Amino acid sequence: MTFLGPAPSVDDLRDIRYVLTDIDDTLTTKGRLLPETYAALWDLNYAGIEVITVTGGSAGWCEHIARAWPVTAAIGESGAFVMTANHNTVSVEYWEDEALQIERRKAHLENVEALLGERFRFAHDQQFRLADVAVDIIGYPRDQVDSLAEQIRATGASVAISSVHINSWVGDYNKQTMSERVLRRLGLTDGALQQEVAFSGDSRNDGPMFAFFDKTFGVANILPVLDDLPKKPRWITSRDAGLGFVDLAKAILAAR
């Protein structure tokens, strides 16, 4: 069984031209990109379906993805920037002024560091981030994670909680706002945004994407946080993480 509950119809999937997807625990499985999942990205690419990764992941990670993966663009650090590649040249466009976002991050990093205490620590890739502050949460009780997130929000920052990090930043953007900006620059109208775009995700920080787009997928490991989402994904795969993404990619391709 590919999906839990009702499956999308051919009519639901036939017109999809863009697949936007989270990375951690949506494309990756236990932190690794399985060969089947990477092949699914290439299968979509060969079929003329453009893939855009939309992640809280760092600029360092996104630079590699834009350069080496079969994607049209990599949106990183929860919408702080979008990276695109032309052969071996990677371009970065920030949501706002580059210097402003970097300066905000410097001050915000100090604010968050004062809140971490003895238990929490910055993400291992913090040094490769340009606008975002990330805190590791794997293995921490949810009540402690949520408490720290609220303390960070109280500083005036935006906060999103993924399956691996608390991501926080200073700025009026998120995954959805940058995704919409990128897609509109590609020429998509209001109607096309809902008809021709699919999104896949797995965690609370994907909430704005599930709320905005019509054709949304959760991989099965989203089930524990479904009740935290103001709007749930329209369809949920029966397999977790990267294998769930394989199944939704196959369904999209079969509908064509």
Image: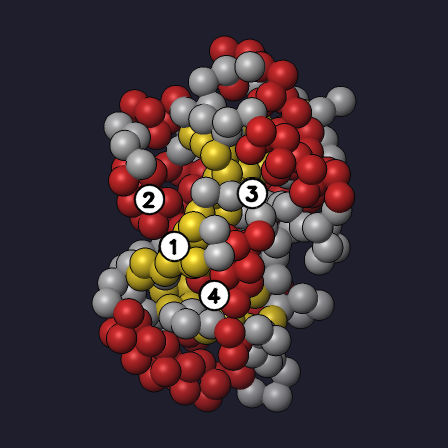
Which quarter of the figure has residue 153? bottom left
In the image, what residue occupies the spot 55% across and 14% down?
256
Spatial CA span between label 3 and label 1: 15 Å
Spatial CA span between label 1 and label 2: 8 Å
* Mark 2 or 4, nearer chain start: 4
Callout 3 crowding tier (Cα within 10 Å): few <14, some 14–19, many ≥20:
some
In the image, what residue occupies the spot 52% across and 54% down?
67
Callout 2 crowding tier (Cα within 10 Å): few <14, some 14–19, many ≥20:
some
Kind of residue at badge 1: Val
Circles 1 and 2: CB atoms closer than 8 Å = yes
Quadrant containing the N terminus in the rendered view? top right
Report the residue marked by disc 3. 70
Kind of residue at badge 2: Val
Circles 4 and 1: CB atoms closer than 8 Å = no
Report the residue marked by disc 4. 59
In the image, what residue occupies the spot 68% across and 29% down?
247
Q: Can residue 130 be seen in this view?
A: yes
Spatial CA span between label 2 and label 4: 17 Å
Spatial CA span between label 3 and label 4: 17 Å
Can you tell which of label 3 and label 1 is closer to the viewer?
3
The secondary structure type at the circle numbered 4 is: helix
